[in-house]
Image (cartoon, rainbow, N blue to C red):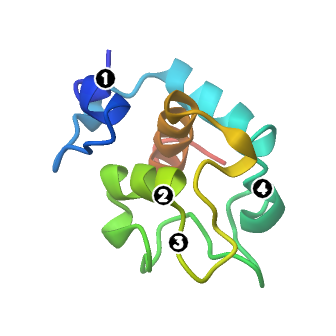
Amino acid sequence: MFGGATAFALHQVPAQPDTTAITSGMVYEGRAIFHGKGMCAACHGKKLEGGQIAPTLKSHAWRDAKNGDFAAIYYVATHGVPSTLMVSHPGGISNAEALAVASYVWSVGQGKVKP
């Protein structure tokens, strides 16, 4: 399982999580949450292309999730971004669901999977 799962559950994001432990199942679950319960696609687009409301989540010059780091993506999903429409736990997702969404977004940003 994900090497930092315990730390994530306690809201203590490790500096360098083990992204090699991200499974296709985590990415699949994250994709489903992104397009469903999390309502992420409403602002970030169906292909993570972004738009007027929210930035792209594909590889780019990241503003809030610095450098597109996995831990930073997870942090944004669980803490939101002040003074923006990005709320913590969008759609009421749990920390575990946020971890799956972060796995999906990070994997797309790294070119490992398609949106």
Q: Are marks 3 and 2 in contact (CB under 8 Å)?
A: yes
Residue 105 in the image: state x and y as whole percent: 53, 50
Residue 83 in the image: state x and y as whole percent: 59, 83
- Label 4 or label 3, whichever comes before in sequence order: 4
In this rendering, position of residue 11 left or right of residue 63: left
* Residue at (51, 25) in percent of width and height: 26
Residue 79 in the image: state x and y as whole percent: 48, 58
User: Image height check: is 1 above or below 26?
Assistant: above
Q: Nearer the viewer, residue 57 or 83?
A: 83
* Residue at (22, 34) in percent of width and height: 18
Element under disc 2: helix
Name the residue tied to disc 3.
Answer: 81
Quarter holding the N terminus is: top left
In this rendering, position of residue 94 left or right of residue 35: left
Q: Which mark is residue 49?
A: none
Residue 44 visible here: yes
Residue 110 visible here: no
